[in-house]
Each structure stands twice: as C-alpha cells, then as structure tokens.
Image (tube, rainbow, N blue to C red):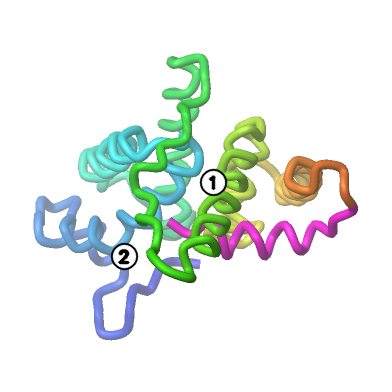
Amino acid sequence: MPDRGPRGEPPDADLMQRTAQGDRDAFAHLYRRHQATIFRFARLMTGCDAAAEDIVQEVFLALMRDASKYDAARASLTTYLFGVARHLTRRRLLRERRFVALDSSGAPEPLAGDDAGAHLQQRRSMEELRRAILALPSRYREVVVLCDLEETSYADAAAAVGCPVGTIRSRLHRARQMLATALAAGAPSKTHRVTDAVRERCAV
C-alpha cells in the first residue's frame, strides 16, 4: 500500500515526483519523514551509530539519484527504502567481514537516587537484547527488525527483502526462537514475550 503521509501533508508518491523533477524542498520533506525509521533499521543491523548514519546518507543519496525510477504502484516508499538500506547494510557487513561492535554512545546517562539501580538494570537488559539481535545471522536479524521493531507487514517485509512471504514467516519464527534461547539462557520462554521485549527495549 502506498504511503499516504501524515494528515494534511503530501503523500510520498507526490513528493517523489517532485524530487525527480529537482525539487529540493520535496526531497528534504521525504528525508525528515523517513530518516529516523531508516536510521533505526541500520543501527540495529550494524550495531553502530556511525555506520547507521553513513547508511542513511547513502540511502537518501540513492533516493535523490534514482527518484525517477521509483514506482509507487510496486511498493510503498518505506518498503523501497528498507530494501535499499538492506542492500547497503549487507554490502557493508560483507566488506568489513565482521559485525560492528555495539555502540552504546547514544544510551541515556544513569539516573541518580532510588531509580539508579532500576535504570541500570533496564539499560543492561536493553543492551543484552540488542547484542542478541546483532548476533543473529543477517537474514534472521533483518526480519526481526522489520517485522517486530518496525511492525512492517509480512508482505512489505517480503518485498523489501526480495523473498516469498512464507520465507519471511519461517525466518521470523526461527529468529524469535533463537532470541528466546539467547535471552533465557536455557529457561523456558514463549516467543511472543520475546517479541514484546524487542519492541519495548530496542526502541532507538
């Protein structure tokens, strides 16, 4: 389904047409609308703020360059951007031949007083979950980020990844099992609890 944009604002398809015609204001509007979403995806795929920022810049440079090639009838702009970000992220990880270490520079400072202990435990739990996501093979990690964090539909995730919907479902099921095992350290755990934890603790 095409992105309609926030109420009272032009839809993505219109902004893309204007961007293809050289309208820099339209491009800036698209950047403001989608930058945070693509940053979250790239950060959880790479584990590094700096790498995520680089990928965001590459994604939107590609968007500006290829705006005239975008077909709103084939995929929403969000799905299209996820696909570009996925390609760039995979290429970067293959080039580096390793996972980037988790960058916690953006984590909040510890609180003072009675809440300090609870805040520290929450921060540790959040980092533990992020590390568990980063440890997943990329084909599983990307479906967790797309479906559980960004709440992308299976159909849109399949379009972004370039595989059948059934493959998305099976990969997501396997990814949740792997996360449950990693987080529970052998204790019984239900995958829907892992999904809830991902949404609550991995917001960036």
On whether residue 198 falls in the magenta region, the answer is yes
For label 1, the residue is: 127
Residue 85 vs residue 63: left or right? right
Comparing 154 with 95, the one in front is: 95
Q: Is residue 162 visible?
A: no
Comparing 87 with 18, the one in front is: 87
* Magenta stretch, overall SS: helix
Q: Amino acid at mark 2?
A: Asp
Q: Is residue 51 above or below residue 24?
A: above
Residue 176 vs residue 31: left or right? right
For label 2, the residue is: 12
Q: Where in the figure is residue 126, as x and y percent of width and height? A: 55, 52
Report the residue that reaches farthest toward the front. 113
Tag 2, which secondary structure?
helix
Characterize the local packing of mark 2: few (<14), some (14-19) or many (20 or more) Cα atoms within 10 angstroms: many
Characterize the local packing of mark 1: few (<14), some (14-19) or many (20 or more) Cα atoms within 10 angstroms: some
On whether residue 15 falls in the magenta region, the answer is no
Disc sitting over residue 13 in the figure: none
The boundaries of the magenta stretch are 188-204
Residue 193 vs residue 148: left or right? right
The residue drawn where x is 76% and y is 51% is 169
Tag 1, which secondary structure?
helix
Report the residue that reaches farthest toward the bottom. 8
